[in-house]
Image (cartoon, grey):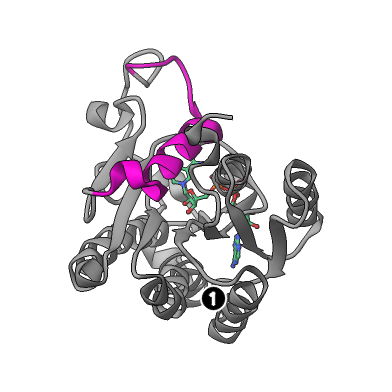
Amino acid sequence: MSNRDNRFSGRTAIITGAGSGIGKAAALKLAREGANVALFDLKDTRTKEVEEELNGIREGCARAFDVDTSNPDRIERAVLEAVEIFGGIDIVFANAGINGVLAPIEELKLEDWEKTLNINLNGTFLTVKYAIPHLKKRGQGSIIITSSVNGTRVFTGFGMIAYSTTKAGQVAFAKMAALELAKFKIRVNVICPGAISTNIDQSTDKQGNLEDIVIPIEYPEGGQPLEDGPGTADEVADLVAFLASDESRHITGSQIFIDGAESLLR
Ligand code: NAD
């Protein structure tokens, strides 16, 4: 086994949204390379399946926790439980998110706006907040936050006003946190994926007269200069693993686009 196969050995990661898509791919990658992984997600069969798959790689390396990122008590408790089971936290991947309701602003209900903000943005804040004391105890740590090209480089996701607002907020949060936590050797970076094949469409609810606000724009065929279609969750997981590892030890406060240059076209 090379060192790289073991680069997370003795380390523990918390991953939110670990039951599907990018979170699941990152959980598999980190576990294969030696990490213990606390899988935070709305506990459903998918998350249990990820737990089983990871424990098949290395018995005892994974535990699924029933966590709604918009519920502060549940996050706080799950963080404590994870620390009790695995002995500490080294890596935090704040990744859970929904597209939520897509609608014109005047038709978007406050409760739908709040739901997206609570899960995506409050969830990021709460996950990081409750993990910090444990990262400090380790004397170092790596926090990675999943934002998006939407709200950071792309503003043509018509109807995605709540989603894009959370994604922009996550970038500011990550950069502020990077400065605040640098003296504790805790690094904070934010990744901005473009279109990635996952289950995120299941969390998308189109409402109202969206066609009224769409400005028709024609993109070049293919849409992505580097590849002719969406990226994969595994490609994002490779970036997450790099940012989680010591190979990125001088990188903090960085915003990394992983989109095949898709967002530069828009
Ligand atoms: P996904 O739907 O496949 O996975 C998201 C996971 O988050 C699911 O397992 C879901 O159960 C979980 N989740 C949802 N609400 C939750 C809550 N309240 N508490 C805990 N867990 C919750 O989607 P994905 O594409 O893997 O999304 C992961 C992140 O990537 C999101 O933050 C999303 O905004 C971001 N992102 C995705 C894309 C894309 O094209 N797929 C692009 C840019 C950014």
| Quarter placement of the C terminus | top left
> Residue shown at 46%/62% (left/top)?
90
Magenta segment: does it hold 21? no
| Residue 18 at least partly seen | yes
Q: Circle 1 sits on which residue?
A: 70
Residue 263, x across and y down, in percent? 29, 33
> Residue shown at 18%/67% (left/top)?
179
116 w.r.t. 24: above or below: below
**140 horizontally vs 48: left or right:** left
Label 1's element?
A: loop
| Residue 155 at least partly seen | no
| Quarter placement of the N terminus | top right
Magenta region, mostly helix, strand or loop? helix
Type of the residue with mark 1: Ser
Magenta stretch, residue numbers = 225-249
> Residue shown at 62%/72% (left/top)?
82
| Near-viewer residue (123 or 251) | 251
Label 1 beta carbon less than 8 Å to ligand 1: yes
Residue 69, x across and y down, in percent? 55, 71
Residue 161, x across and y down, in percent? 36, 58
Label 1 crowd (10 A; few <14 / some 14-19 / many >=20): many
Q: Quadrant of residue 169 in the image?
A: bottom left
217 w.r.t. 134: above or below: above
Magenta segment: does it hold 246? yes
The residue furthest bottom is 73
**237 horizontally vs 37: left or right:** left
> Residue shown at 37%/52% (left/top)?
147
Residue 116, x across and y down, in percent? 48, 66
Q: Quadrant of residue 126 in the image?
A: bottom left
